[in-house]
Image (cartoon, grey):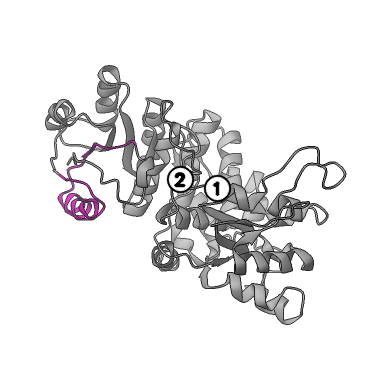
Amino acid sequence: MYFCGMYDKYTTFGNTAFINNILIIDDDITLSLMLKTWLAKKGFNVNTAIKISDAKKEIVKCKPELIISDLRLPDENGISFLKWTKERYPEIIFIMMTGYADIQTAVESIRSGAYDYIAKPLNPDELLIKIHSIAPSKEDNNFPPANVAGKTKKSFSDYIQGNSPEYKKVYEHVDMVASTDLSVFIRGDSGVGKEHIARMIHHKSKRATGPFIPVDCGTMSRELSASEFFGHLRGSFTGAINNKKGYFLEANGGTLFLDEIGNLSPDIQMQLLRVLQEKKIKPVGASKEIKVDVRIITATNEDLDVTASKGKFRSDLYHRINEFLIAVPSLKECKDDIPLFAHHFLGRANLELNENVTGFDEDALKFLIAYRWPGNLRELKNVIFRMTLITKKNKITSAALLENIPEIARPPKGDKK
């Protein structure tokens, strides 16, 4: 199957998209119809085909900037088609579609010149984010940079979407709130991917062409936090040798993501509340206020309801930032997604560490699924990267897993479940 169409600029990507023509190849008719309908709503003109022989002809006809191809096709495999295209049209960007059972082949495709891969069953929103992630990496693109899912060309995305009901509920809430300007409060344990959810909201919003500025409030100096948030004028205090814009001005027209907001001092909480209410900031040392247009997304692993009730966090600020709540599940609540995440991280590890581990043995996967993952996705990623680096076999075995990461064989300390 292929799609060849013109991207409507009055869509999610606004005027930043340089991807106009897309060619998608797959022989799955059901998937073809689903994507045809979905992409048509996003502004694409869609055609379908099932063979690479036809797709080669359409490259000349459509002149695509992006090809999205399945790895397994009736008349040729995706890797050989990728190599054929790169030899003749090196400027065309590739995204490969694959089941996670073919993760090693996906890694091979990236080494052969593909930009990224996307796992089946396909999530259309994830595909759209990957398409959006390509724009900042084009060298002759003069559009303003954006923070996107894929950090560098030829790299796997940092995150893959889960298929469990809990994760799907999160994505539904993202879709609901993205088009609004409501302040979003993201609650979830450490390591669940709260910043990724914030980035999803930003990329799906009308602010997608503007900046996304993440701030870790947990590492912010109490003495300098006002300057960090609102900026300062040169000479306004000792050490202020230059003017500073501050996070709010850096995020003007876009989104400001405040992680671990519960760590802010009371005086900064008060100043932040005033800014959110009046949409104006006053840099340290300035006499005039400056209007700002910033959407606020906040996150914490604390229960701010309890913290606010104890007077340790301003309740009025809490209600102001919590206009829409998104609760991100922990990994132990979504165990069926662990194989999907594990194979995704294995693909990234193979690429970044230049290894060729093909998968996991059956018992290794059982241990991964049974473990409760107190560090959530971040911990899973670290474990997979470590095992990929030290394993001596084609697959990560249960024996190697237990020898090198013995905590996998027992529940976390204090967990009685």
Q: Residue at x 43, y 26 (%)?
A: 139
Above or below: residue 108 compared with residue 384:
above
Q: Which of the 4 image quadrants contains residue 22?
A: top left
- The residues colored magenta run 18-46
Q: Nearer the viewer, residue 220 or 107?
A: 220
Q: Residue at x 21, y 47 (%)?
A: 44
Q: Nearer the viewer, residue 402 or 179?
A: 179
Task: Measure the C-alpha gap from mark 1 to mark 2.
Answer: 18 Å
Residue 70 in sight in this render:
no
Above or below: residue 411 compared with residue 148:
below
Quadrant where the C terminus is found in the figure: bottom right
Q: Position of residue 263 (x, y in %)?
A: 74, 63
Above or below: residue 257 compared with residue 105:
below
- How packed mark 2 is, by other alpha carbons closer than 10 Å (few <14, some 14-19, many 20 or more), is many
Q: Position of residue 168 (x, y in %)?
A: 40, 64
Q: Secondary structure at mark 2?
A: helix
Quadrant where the N terminus is found in the figure: top left
Q: Which residue is mark 2?
A: 344
Q: Residue at x 36, y 47 (%)?
A: 14
Q: Which residue is mark 1?
A: 398
